[in-house]
């Protein structure tokens, strides 16, 4: 009975947040002269309206989930890994290069591409961890700055040595990866690919790791009180490198599944423009770094984005308004105006 | 009657923290509130200070029924509280900390001179010396406490609640604080004093109210009672006198020779420390806190590396070893600051209990859930730790119960060597009895214990040998038989041993 009550309580906050967020959105829609009900209807349709739109939303959520999981692990260990963007881009580039140039059968290429992405993203992230452990460089700053290096580095590669010269378009991108190496689609004719399954598996593995393994326990304690952890014999340096590597590995994998499941090549800007990395970090923050919560929040954010696109297609309301709604929703979900707060207010008045 | 709290009841779900508690305070009186951890003292004071609303009951102040929604309300009604953990900004000056919240201003600019003048005025009025220009972080804990009290007085408090005010003070500072309290009551201020230290209460309080399990077991005049009676009222039974076996030291367990640590300032943190602890003995280290005890313990447990010297545990050098290796070799450690080193507040009771045991409670890297649960719930039973459940976050445990959890966790390591730093700080009589009993039992079972405590009574009660630290050095050694409080105090203050 108590458990049900508790679950209801923890649900009340996000629900309330969504309602308030929608009200703010409604005001924005009214200001630009849109029909509120119609607009929200289109938004819903764009996100979940049909199997096509639903799978589209899930496919957009895939890299966001993976990045969110990686960030969640680092956050739980007490490290602010803001470098997901760079780690993802390097992962994507490595996956594309591996898929294009590693010899062997297609399945081997695919696996090699995924592993290459995890390793390159992981090393890039662990580098920042090493700089912190060795030279006491602030992790927040190094991870942020390493983003620029990674993104520009990848940009250079696809603009010069790896540039696709076969097609007519002079775009900064690698050659197209052979169809046999693509991640399989889950439903024919839909955009959702096997990367989504990988993301869900990753979510379960991370949940399990954090909750039931010695390492996971130590990681959480390190994040909760670093002095307590060092007092208890937790090896901070080692655990930090591992956590940062896995965290970056998740981001690298996010880049790989985008390349192998959606784009089929590394295209300059294709991962940074949609802001997957920042959406992923947001999902983590919303969910308080809980793995399953992070995945759920990632899907919510993706739905807001695909919904916004649907709204723009079918109504007069511009995309910017949908972004306002998104921002308002996220803002209110992140606010911790909890049940207790409401209760206290009631009492103070009564 | 200045203040009356009538029939206060406070329940959290099924837990009742206060049950029909009556409490009164006269003008110019010191009324002490005592009881074991979790007896409901702090809850009662939080209600008075507006941090909690009572489930039922009323507060009458100066004949008027009042209700406080928050501490600001309470302060407006001239009630002030000094918390157990000081709430000061270490990087701000004494004067800035005192005027905070009601700063004197010149236009929109903060008036520093005026703040200093206000502070000096308070110092003169109440006879509590502080230097307004000093940064709080550079002040001793005793001075910080004075700053807290002056802050409350500046806010206009007539009733001052002191929560465990002497827990972190040196004997001399305690004396000064008690004097200050007496001085302020002579000026008409009234005090509510929460404390575990019955001797101090006997010295300063006019009346004493004892709480047990959320209920009042009695309110007595200090003149009509004694420490034994109070203990009985708190615990609800007679305290057991602890027996100990004869002192027979065995072979050395930890050997420290010539350990030094340079400080960032000119004075070294540790200078040529040499000491041994043998099987079957408790070695007590006395000293005013901040004289190198923390650094010594950190060096022993691997949290700080000495610049020179050698430390051997069970015959193996450990001065360069990692914490985990040292623990594996045979060290357990009750840390001096439980919130800083001893627990993670957001983690559960079970998780906090698991620290240091995780490598034994596992198979293929997976935690053995059932076995861990059994281990921790065993401690909860044996040490009578009051907690909602094993998955309660440790921040919801009272200080004493948290301390019992830490002590249980470290004793359960069953290591040949145990560091016990301030093992009973902020702990009530009943818990102290349990912890002291367990430490002595470990000694009788041929364990080696290094006890560091700022409580001389604790050092004298438990130790077989006593070392005194002053400014990073060991300045004296006394056998249990020859040690007296006077001799130790003299050494602690840097004086030479006499006789």
Image (cartoon, helix red, strand yellow):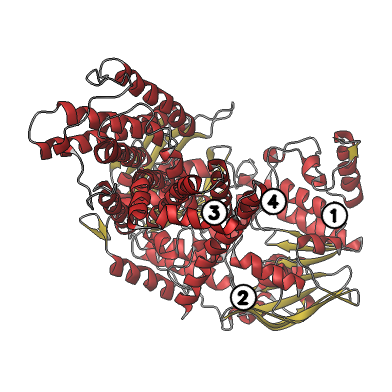
Calculate the distance from the C-alpha at mark 1 to the C-alpha at mark 3.
60 Å
Q: Label 2 lies in what chain?
A: B
State which chain disc 1 sits on: B
Q: Residues within 10 Å of mark 4 (few under 14, many from 20)?
A: few
Q: Are marks 1 and 3 on the same chain?
A: no
Mark 4 and 1 residues: CB-CB less than 8 Å, in contact? no
- Location of residue A105 in the rendering, given as x and y in whole percent from the top left corner: 7, 35
Q: Are marks 4 and 1 on the same chain?
A: yes
Picture quadrant of residue A337: bottom right
Above or below B339: residue A121: above
Quadrant in which the N terminus of chain B appears? bottom right
Q: Residue B482's image quarter?
A: bottom right
In the picture of the structure, the residue carrying the numbered disc 2 is B39
- Residue at 22% x, 29% y is A176
The numbered dot on residue A39 is: 3
Quick check: do tags 3 and 4 share a chain?
Answer: no
Examine the rendered structure and indicate whether residue A6 appears above or below residue A245: below
């Amino acid at each position: 009975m108590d458990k049900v009550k508790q679950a209801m309580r923890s649900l009340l906050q996000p629900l309330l947040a969504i309602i308030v967020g929608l009200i703010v959105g409604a005001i924005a829609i009214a200001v630009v002269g849109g029909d509120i009900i119609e607009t929200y209807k289109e938004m819903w349709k764009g996100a979940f309206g049909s199997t096509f739109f639903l799978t589209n939303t899930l496919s957009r959520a895939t890299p966001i989930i993976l990045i969110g999981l990686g960030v969640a692990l680092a956050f739980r260990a007490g490290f602010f890994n803001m470098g997901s963007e760079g780690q993802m881009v390097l992962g994507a580039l490595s996956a594309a290069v591996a898929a294009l140039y590693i010899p062997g059968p297609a399945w081997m290429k695919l696996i090699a591409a995924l592993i290459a992405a995890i390793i390159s993203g992981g090393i890039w992230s662990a580098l920042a961890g090493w700089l912190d452990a060795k030279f006491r460089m602030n992790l927040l700053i190094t991870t942020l700055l390493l983003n620029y290096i990674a993104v520009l580095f990848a940009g250079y590669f696809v603009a010069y040595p790896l540039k696709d010269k076969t097609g007519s378009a002079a775009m900064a991108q690698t050659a197209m990866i052979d169809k046999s190496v693509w991640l399989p689609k889950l439903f024919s004719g839909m955009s959702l690919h096997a990367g989504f399954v990988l993301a869900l598996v990753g979510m379960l593995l991370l949940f399990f790791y954090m909750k039931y393994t010695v390492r996971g326990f130590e990681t959480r304690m390190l994040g909760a009180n670093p002095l307590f952890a060092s007092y208890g014999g937790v090896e901070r340096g080692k655990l930090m490198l591992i956590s940062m590597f896995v965290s970056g590995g998740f981001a690298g994998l996010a880049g790989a599944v985008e390349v192998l499941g959606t784009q089929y090549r590394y295209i300059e800007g294709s991962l940074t423009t949609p802001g997957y990395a920042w959406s992923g970090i947001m999902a983590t923050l919303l969910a308080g770094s809980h793995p399953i919560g992070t995945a759920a929040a990632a899907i919510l954010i993706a739905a807001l984005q695909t919904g916004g696109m649907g709204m723009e297609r079918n109504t007069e309301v511009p995309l910017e308004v949908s972004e306002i709604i998104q921002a308002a929703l996220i803002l209110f979900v992140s606010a911790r105006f909890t049940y207790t707060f409401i209760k206290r207010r009631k009492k103070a008045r009564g | 009657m200045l203040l009356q709290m009538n029939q206060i009841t406070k329940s959290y779900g099924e837990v009742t923290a206060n049950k029909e508690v009556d409490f009164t305070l006269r003008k110019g009186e010191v009324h002490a509130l005592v009881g074991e951890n979790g007896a409901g003292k702090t809850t009662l004071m939080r209600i008075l200070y507006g941090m909690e609303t009572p489930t039922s009951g009323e507060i009458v102040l100066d004949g008027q029924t009042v209700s406080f929604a928050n501490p600001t309300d309470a302060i407006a009604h001239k009630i002030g509280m000094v918390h157990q953990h000081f709430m000061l900004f270490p990087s701000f000056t004494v004067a800035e900390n005192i005027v905070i919240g009601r700063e004197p201003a010149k236009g929109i600019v903060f008036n520093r001179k005026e703040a200093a003048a206000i502070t000096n005025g308070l110092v003169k009025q109440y006879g509590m010396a502080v230097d307004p220009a000093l940064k709080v972080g550079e002040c001793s804990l005793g001075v910080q406490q004075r700053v807290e009290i002056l802050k409350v007085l500046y806010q206009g408090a007539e009733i001052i609640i002191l929560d465990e005010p002497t827990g972190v003070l040196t004997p001399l500072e305690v004396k000064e604080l008690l004097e200050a309290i007496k001085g302020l009551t002579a000026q008409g201020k009234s005090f509510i004093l929460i404390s575990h230290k019955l001797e101090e209460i006997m010295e300063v309080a006019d009346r004493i109210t004892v709480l047990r399990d959320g209920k009042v077991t009695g309110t007595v005049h200090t003149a009509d009672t004694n420490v034994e009676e109070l203990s009985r009222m708190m615990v609800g039974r007679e305290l057991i006198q602890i027996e100990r076996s004869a002192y027979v030291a065995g072979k050395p367990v930890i050997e420290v020779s010539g350990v030094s640590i340079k400080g960032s300032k000119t004075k070294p943190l540790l200078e040529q420390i040499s000491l041994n602890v043998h099987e079957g003995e408790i070695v007590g280290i006395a000293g005013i806190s901040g004289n190198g005890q923390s650094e010594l313990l950190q060096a022993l447990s691997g949290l700080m590396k000495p610049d020179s010297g050698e430390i051997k545990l069970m015959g193996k050098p450990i001065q360069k070893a990692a914490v985990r290796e040292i623990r594996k070799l045979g060290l357990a450690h009750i840390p001096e600051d439980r919130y800083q080193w001893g627990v993670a507040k957001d983690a559960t009771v079970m998780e906090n209990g698991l620290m240091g045991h995780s490598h034994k409670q596992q198979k293929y890297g997976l935690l053995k859930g059932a076995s861990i649960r059994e281990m921790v719930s065993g401690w909860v039973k044996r040490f009578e730790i009051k907690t909602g459940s094993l998955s309660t976050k440790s921040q919801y445990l009272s200080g004493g119960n948290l301390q019992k959890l830490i002590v249980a966790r470290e004793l359960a390591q069953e290591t040949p060597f145990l560091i016990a730093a301030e093992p009973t700080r902020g702990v009530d009589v009943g818990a102290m009895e349990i912890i002291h009993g367990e430490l002595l039992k470990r000694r009788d079972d041929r364990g080696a214990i290094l006890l560091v405590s700022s409580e001389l009574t604790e050092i004298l009660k438990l130790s077989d040998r006593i070392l005194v630290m002053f400014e990073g050095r060991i300045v004296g050694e006394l056998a249990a038989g020859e040690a007296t409080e006077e001799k130790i105090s003299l050494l602690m203050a840097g004086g030479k041993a006499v006789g």
